[in-house]
Amino acid sequence: MTGNDVATVAAMTPEAPQPDTVKILLVDDKPENLVALEAVLDGLGQELIKAQSGKDALRACLEHDFAAILLDVKMPDMDGFETAAMIREREQSKDTPIIFLTALKSEEHLFRGYYMGAVDYLYKPIVPEVLRSKVAVFVDLCRKNAILKKNRDALEQKNAQLQQEVAERIERKRTFAG
């Protein structure tokens, strides 16, 4: 086993270093709600990006990849459902977990939220421990997906290298046999 093989195997172990931080998008038209969400999630040590409208959220999704999006349902101009639909249309953000937040306790809104691709739907006032634990799951998944992608890329690179070596050996064998 070469030094490169050892490095590749080490990169694939569960103890491989995790990315430092991931980004979480907080979307609410009320600044005080954004401050409250920020206070609840600050302990996770991740980068929190705030948006005060659906349009701001869409702009943020063009600039960043997010581990999760916390999205208020009731906002002026573009509500959370419309925002979620547009987020889902974009290839890069179509699988980003969305947690809807709302004070409206309506089964119709609940079902619409899940139909729009929500992974969860929480009613305000939010229980901080519940929100923090749910978001922590998506942070962990995002980190693990990043590690899997890195390992997949390393394996693809190693596979291409091995295929090249096999092709060279076959060519050398033909040269010596002929």
Image: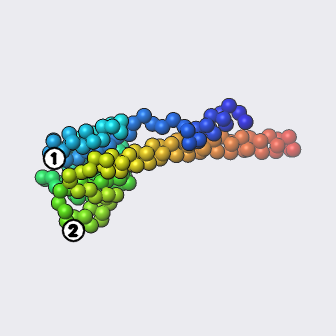
In this picture, residue 169 sits left or right of residue 27 = right
Q: Nearer the viewer, residue 161 or 92?
A: 92
What amino acid does circle 1 point to?
A: Asp
- Which residue is label 2 attached to? 108
- The residue drawn where x is 42% and y is 34% is 20
Q: Nearer the viewer, residue 94 or 143?
A: 143
Picture quarter with the C terminus: top right
**Image x and y of residue 124, in percent:** 20, 53
In this picture, residue 148 sits left or right of residue 7 = left
- The residue drawn where x is 47% and y is 47% is 145
- Give the number of the disc on residue 29: 1
**Image x and y of residue 60, in percent:** 27, 42
Label 2 – label 1 distance at C-alpha: 22 Å
- The residue drawn where x is 33% and y is 37% is 43
Instruction: Specify the color scheme.
Output: rainbow
Picture quarter with the N terminus: top right
Q: Is any part of residue 144 visible from this angle?
A: yes
Q: Nearer the viewer, residue 90 or 115?
A: 115
- The residue drawn where x is 26% and y is 62% is 113
